[in-house]
Image: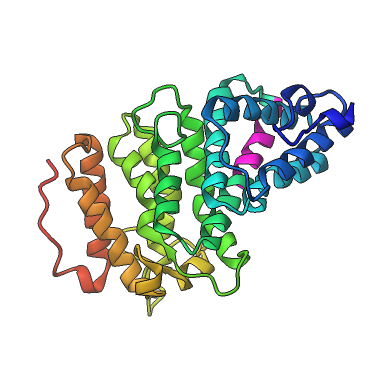
């Protein structure tokens, strides 16, 4: 019965969320949004959140038409923003990622693309949530821990985490951050704290035992971002190191980013952002727990880009990457 899909004491039961009847599922999702967005509501206990997300996961599983899938993905992800308490929103986000990692290998090829779309919607909504919080330092720390803790999609030490999740996040992360900065839930958003937001990828790039994972992070995230922040060339002659990319310039991010403290720093120049990114790369490569092979790759990328900058060509540090 529809009236049973929600109550004032608990969220919709999984059997309603995963019902074969679309109307029942739709009502259950709306009841869930109403339940979680109650301002007096605290975060659910971990076990209850896991049970809830199993129901939501299969609610989405049952959606079988592209338009329905797109609408449902947006509706589920936007629950993050329907919740007024940021801590409760982040608990819901943690439930999403833990459920996604746990259930990922059960997804068949016919359904995998729609789950990639759901991830994209959640990445975008997560950034809009952090923008709404004013890039609150504690919220950003919790967000990063959600991604990198055991069971998180960017955890370098949990072999149970499917590598395809890190690949997909690398592919979409900057694009969705740029979109979120261009259509935020608040006017004139504070600059995005780039070093903070990239920290999970630097951690994974330094510690992943998988060469392909490192290469994907570099090609899909580090290289395009360094290119977006590169100084304009006066001639048509290409860079002596590698050609400049013509796409993925991330205009909103380029014009509205800082290192780590939006309120104190304000938006900084692309030259400063590039220096910040290269310093973070060098510092990460220097850390004792960085794998030797990854250390060499990070140093090589750092050196290549330092030499590629006119201003850095004569002042770079000497690095022994052997």
Q: Which contiguous range is marked in magenta?
A: 110-120
Count of residue discs: 0
**Along the viewing direction, whichever of 260 and 106 lies nearer the viewer:** 260
Q: Quadrant of the C terminus?
A: top left
Picture coordinates of residue 304, whole percent (x, y): 25, 57
Residue 61 visible in image = yes
Magenta stretch, main secondary structure, is helix
Image quadrant containing the N terminus? top right
Snapshot quadrant of residue 214 = top left
* Location of residue 232 with respect to 97 vertically, above or below: below
Tell me the quarter of the picture where residue 258 sits. bottom left
Tell me where residue 270 sits by quadrant. bottom left
Q: Does the magenta-highlighted stretch encompass residue 114?
A: yes
**Is 85 left or right of 108, judged from the image as shown?**
left
Could you say where residue 22 lies in the image, as x and y percent from the top left? 86, 31
Q: Position of residue 155 (x, y in %)?
A: 39, 34
Q: Please, which residue is most extreme toward the bottom here?
A: 234
Closer-to-camera residue (285/184): 184
- Residue 222 visible? The answer is no
Left or right: residue 77 versus residue 70 is left
Above or below: residue 60 compared with residue 311: above
Left or right position of 290 against 171: left
């Amino acid at each position: 019965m529809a009236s049973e899909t929600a109550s004032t004491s608990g969220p919709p039961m999984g059997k309603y969320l995963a019902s074969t009847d679309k109307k029942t599922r739709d009502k259950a999702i709306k009841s869930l949004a109403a339940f979680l967005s109650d301002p007096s509501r605290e975060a659910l206990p971990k076990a209850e959140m896991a049970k809830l997300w199993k129901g939501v996961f299969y609610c989405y599983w049952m959606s079988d038409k592209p338009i329905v899938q797109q609408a449902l993905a947006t509706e589920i992800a936007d629950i993050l923003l329907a919740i007024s308490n940021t801590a409760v929103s982040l608990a819901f986000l943690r439930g999403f990622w833990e459920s996604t990692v746990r259930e990922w290998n059960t997804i068949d090829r016919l359904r995998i693309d729609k789950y990639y779309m759901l991830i994209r919607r959640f990445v975008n909504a997560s950034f809009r949530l952090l923008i709404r919080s004013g890039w609150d330092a504690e919220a950003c720390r919790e967000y990063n821990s959600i991604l990198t803790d055991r069971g998180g999609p960017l955890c370098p030490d949990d072999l149970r985490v499917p590598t395809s999740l890190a690949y997909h996040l690398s592919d979409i992360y900057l694009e969705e951050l740029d979109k979120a900065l261009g259509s935020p839930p608040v006017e004139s958003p504070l600059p995005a704290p780039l070093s903070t937001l990239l920290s999970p990828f630097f951690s994974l790039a330094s510690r992943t035992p998988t060469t392909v994972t490192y290469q994907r992070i570099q090609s899909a995230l580090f290289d395009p971002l360094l290119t977006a922040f590169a100084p304009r060339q006066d001639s048509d002659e290409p860079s002596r190191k590698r050609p400049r990319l013509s796409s993925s310039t991330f205009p909103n991010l380029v014009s509205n980013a800082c290192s780590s403290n939006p309120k104190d720093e304000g938006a900084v120049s692309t030259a400063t952002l590039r220096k910040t990114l290269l310093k973070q790369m060098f510092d990460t490569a220097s850390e004792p727990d960085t794998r030797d092979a990854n250390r060499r790759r990070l140093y090589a990328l750092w050196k290549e880009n330092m030499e590629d900058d006119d201003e850095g060509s004569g002042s770079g540090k000497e690095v022994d990457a052997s």
